[in-house]
Image (cartoon, rainbow, N blue to C red):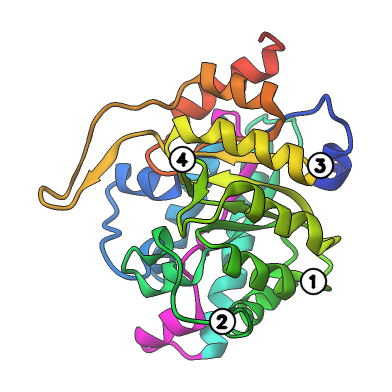
Amino acid sequence: MEPVTPTLREVLSDPSRVVVLDGGLSNQLEAAGHDLGDALWSARLLAEDPEALVAAHLAYYEAGADVATTASYQATFEGFARRGLGRERAARLMALSVRLGREAARRARARGVARPLWVAASVGPYGAMQADGSEYRGRYGLDVAALEAFHRPRLEVLAAARPDVLALETVPDADEAAALLRAVRGLGVPAWLSYTVEGDRTRAGQPLEEAYGLVADAGVDEVVAVGVNCCAPEDARRAVEVAARVTGKPVVVYPNSGETWDAATRGWRGRTAFTADRAQEWRRAGARLVGGCCRVGPEAVATVAARLRSGTS
């Protein structure tokens, strides 16, 4: 009989515990030869090659990640409809994303991974559905009620698939955070909410104190952690510190590698600034869930996991 896996809420109640997140799903898929150059991004493989997603999740579990994040970041009813998929089929694919994470965890345990493993259902911002980079700007011209109406139906589908946590991620704007906090209320599944930031502000320009204060004031029981993702590594520490101070909640942090995308050459440039030393800084600043986002792969996650679990500072 498999041991009972504690819930993330239970683990996060112990301040001495740190949870290692995975890295970028897209770069792992691209490294395996998959073309993600369309509006659905990794969500396209839910319909076309689900086994590829299992393999990517498994690579991160075996590298040392405790959490695999599903391929549902750009999985929306609207996005699937543009590809000719109806709501029923779209809902099945969203739920499948969670089952694929569970299958990867099962295979990891069969291969000898003995630690607890969890699945985070990714919920990207409205801008991800538009596939035009607007998740890095926010301010879509929609009010909070409209954004809540957009997010709630797919949140209901993902929650019904029973992930361990809903990852409300890459949120560029406090208005969208307010909508997500309303939409997740009452679903009965834990969630974390992470902004994408630049410097000491959200991508939409709000001060971090204001953005995290919104989460603190909302008092949504489902939210078990708050933090930052999909930002430059050098911007992560301040966000961690502000999130910890303002909300009093466990903090989640998973920035990008630090490389930048050059649209003219359609390639990445610069050097990675994501290191295990920085991960330790984030941990000392209050982070409890630590991993990577774009361009952070299994090798980097393995290094972070080994350092954080070694207890050295």
Q: Amino acid at mark 4?
A: Gly
Residue occupying image coordinates x 34% and y 69%:
131
Check the image and report above or below for 71 versus 251: below
Circle 4 packing at 10 Å, graded few (<14), some (14-19), many (20+), is some
Q: Which residue is mark 3?
A: 248
Residue 66 in view in this figure: no
Which of the labelled discs sits on residue 143, or is there none?
2
- Label 3, secondary structure: give it: loop
Which of the labelled discs sits on residue 185, or is there none?
1
| Mark with earlier residue (2, 1) | 2
Instruction: Indicate which label's residue lies in the foreground, 3 or 4.
Output: 4
| Mark with earlier residue (3, 2) | 2
Bounds of the magenta span? Answer: 63-86
| Mark with earlier residue (3, 4) | 4
287 sits left or right of 137 in the view: right
| Residue 69 colored in magenta in the image | yes
